[in-house]
Amino acid sequence: MINPNTSQAMTATIEMCARAVVGPGVTVNGITSEIGPESIESYYDEAMSVPGVLKAVRQGEREGVDGYVIACFGDPGLDAARELASGPVLGIAEAAMHTASHLGTGFSVVTTLGRTIGQAAHLAERYGMQRFCRGIHACEIPVLDLDTDPDARKVITEACREALESDRSDVIVLGCAGMADMCHQISAELRVPVVDGVTAAVLTVQSLIMLDLRTSKRGEYAEPLPKAYSTG
Ligand code: 2AL
């Protein structure tokens, strides 16, 4: 499970959430990206995070890792990671949106800053999820404050409540990996399914591996052609 930002505190939180759901015999390694921004909340941050994600996948391939989760809601580097990986690679936005589509007729996404709403909208389009995605909302809490702001869960819960009303939706998708540890409490309070992409993606990867399904190497996800890469 790759955290594409460089916050070790966030990796520790999401690793704990992921380890709590996997089956016996499954090992989850939380990897904090070594290169890039400390949090991802813009197109620039997202682009800057991709080399770190790909470096972690290359390392994972050397170590024989069975599958990967890219644990940031922008799913940075997902296609490129699939070219490198032999096992399945899931992004948390992709996993959360697909999981939500099984649970209700329409979901609302509640993300961090308003400026990331466009990125989530692009992903909903890309994954063919516009039919289910009724709205994308921001709680305006920066990613790194999710861990430290004592009111974070309360503010996010209220944003979810308002999203359910205004979108007439019946499922919530949490729009940041750093919200993973809040999903059960928010769900209990609002009495609707609240999908955290980290756990949804980890269990999807586990299922795919149990089904002996891997990334297809027949087409565009074939390994990149060998060539020289300058790193500056
Ligand atoms: C995220 C996320 O999941 N990790 C991060 O650094 N930024 N998502 C977001 N919408 O801000």
Image (cartoon, grey):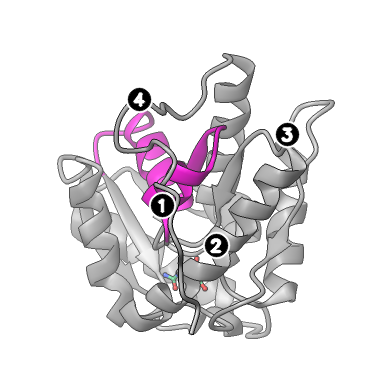
Q: What's the CA distance linking mark 2 and mark 3? A: 22 Å
Give me the residue at 16% from left, 46% from top: 130
What number is the disc on residue 53?
2
User: Which of marks 4 and 3 precedes in the sequence?
Assistant: 3
Q: Residue 93 in the image: x percent, y percent? A: 40, 52
Which residues are the magenta region? 77-106
| Ligand 1 lies under 8 Å from the Cβ of mark 3 | no
Q: Which SS class for mark 3?
A: loop
Q: Which SS class for mark 4?
A: loop
Give me the residue at 51% from left, 41% from top: 89
Residue 27 against residue 6 in the figure, above or below: above
* Direction from residue 225 to residue 105 in the image, left or right: left
Q: What's the CA distance linking mark 1 and mark 3? A: 26 Å
| Ligand 1 lies under 8 Å from the Cβ of mark 4 | no
Q: Mark 1 points at which residue?
A: 80
Q: Residue 12 in the image: x percent, y percent? A: 77, 64
Q: Which amino acid does label 1 sit on?
A: Ala
Q: Which SS class for mark 2?
A: helix
Disc 3 vs disc 4: Cβ atoms closer than 8 Å? Answer: no
Q: What residue type is labelled 3?
A: Val
Q: Mark 4 points at which residue?
A: 218
User: Which of marks 2 and 4 precedes in the sequence?
Assistant: 2
